[in-house]
Amino acid sequence: NSMLSWQRTAFHFQPEKNWMNDPNGPMYYKGWYHFFYQYNPYGAIWGNVIVWGHAVSKDLIHWLHLPLAMVNDQWYDSRGVWTGSATILPDGQVIMLYTGSTNQSVQVQNLAYPADPSDPLLIEWVKHPGNPVIFPPPGIGVRDFRDPTTAWLTSEGKWRFSIGSKVNKTGITLVYDTMDFKTFERVEGVMNAVPGTGMWECVDFYPVSTKSDNGLDTSENGADVRHVVKVSLDEDRHDYYAIGSYDEKKVKFVADDSKNDVGIGLRYDYGIFYASKTFYDQRTQRRVLWGWIFESDSEVADIAKGWASVQSIPRTVVFDRKTGSNLLQWPVEEVDKLRLRSKEFKDMRAEPGSVVPLDIEAATQLDIVAEFEINKEAFEKAAPSNSSYVCSTSGGARQRGALGPFGLLVLADADLSEYTPVYFYVTKGRDGNLKTSFCSDQIQSSVANDVHKHIYGSFVPVLKDEKLSVRILLDHSIVESFAQGGRTVVTSRVYPTRAIYGAARLFLFNNATDATVTASVNVWQMNSAFIRPYHPDQSI
Ligand code: DQQ
């Protein structure tokens, strides 16, 4: 339906049509980034037929679609070739571990290998003749056993990986060891467990360095290393992580801060971002995160447009050495290559209650970097308050306070009949300390009424003498916003009907009652990425 084609993104990864969900088995192999994904080749909704789509890229931005890597052609994956992860062995061999939903809907773990490891595109995949290699263990529900992680090496030379599950309402990580990826040994107990969090999907486990911004290979351990566990909560469809210690001998993970344990504390993204997975990029020594960003329109609309879902811009993930308590996510630097003309707005003043147009061309494919400062007197004058501000239950950008909201209105039309505010909201506590929230408000994002109009967001740590800063990647129907260098991230899908193509505008706004805001904004028009089918005879 060409009427809705403007909703397609220009530099986010999408298949040409139909339904996509989780990222699977991302890796860098012989000069190519490989990306696999959950895919329904027959329609724009998640279905009984789920297979692995496959694409390759030299730079994580421009992609070639390859033939399907795996389809549901075996009894052990006939109801779905579900999520899995890649492990690259020291000799370069690639092992793909994935979940199959059997003809009885039992969740089992399977192995697959490249048919021709000398092919850098890894077009053909073979399933191990001994599949399935792992069945649900006693005491675990046959439908609660899925999404194996990338394996890491123990100091004894065994490969170890985790599979998410639950017992009653407690989310758990089961652990398996193997020497050869042929026979597998269950490690008794669990690596970690958090009551009340339900089924843990798409577990991810990896080390981060506390001394450098380089990423670490999944098997790294030792001094100056913390570990991250991420789970995708089936019950609320959000990805939660915790930073903590991994004790290899005891096979236990313990979160640094029990209030921020896995599944109850920090999220990668306070908007839409699910079933994510990282990989270690040996080419540039970084850890790269992918996340599935589903739609927030109706299924009917998805069927009409013939596709559903995009993937996030790949993000580098590092430990935040300034706060010591969260990760930092940032778009991979390759995305900067798409920047075209830029326009700079320096020291723009926005008085309380004002909307200031930022005069740029069509505002549908943008990279925006902005910094904000509030006048000192407003801080001093602001009355302390007991109640804290919560983006999701607030009145959004229309609810006025002394020190917020202020920020940008993206995907707005000239009359402001549609707009999506991305904003900060500062409050002063009884102790005199300031607290900053970072939010994205979808209430006015579209005049259509078959779309979700939530307010997303959370707190963002702001350290002494830091300005408030945000980077927004805007791509037709997706708004990916990174506050304070990526401490808090909010991604939303929006469906304007008027603020599209040349009619889309960008504004600075300040809806605080007392604060005067000074903003500096740099805006780049973004080129489209090449994301197209691969033809065997074309030169690459
Ligand atoms: N999606 C896959 C499962 C996974 C879920 C099936 C998460 O393996 O648990 O498409 O979105």
Image (tube, rainbow, N blue to C red):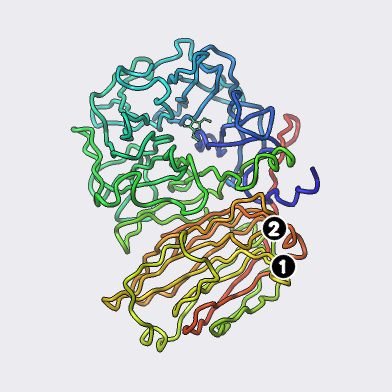
Residue 54 placed where, x, y %? 61, 32
Residue at 41% from the left image edge and 51% from the top image edge: 267
Q: Is residue 345 left or right of residue 144?
A: right
Q: Is residue 289 left or right of residue 171?
A: right
Identity, as a three-letter code, of the amino acid under mark 1: Asp
Picture quadrant of residue 357: bottom right
In the rendered image of this protein, does residue 351 appear above or below residue 205?
A: below
Q: Secondary structure at mark 1?
A: loop
Figure quadrant of the C terminus: top right
In the rendered image of this protein, does residue 205 appear above or below residue 40?
A: below
Would you name the residue on which mark 1 appears? 413
Q: Which mark is residue 346?
A: none
Disc 1 residue lies near ligand 1 with CB under 8 A:
no
Q: Which mark is residue 496?
A: 2
Residue at 40% from the left image edge and 63% from the top image edge: 459
CA gap between label 2 and label 1 equals: 9 Å
In the rendered image of this protein, does residue 125 appear above or below residue 441?
A: above
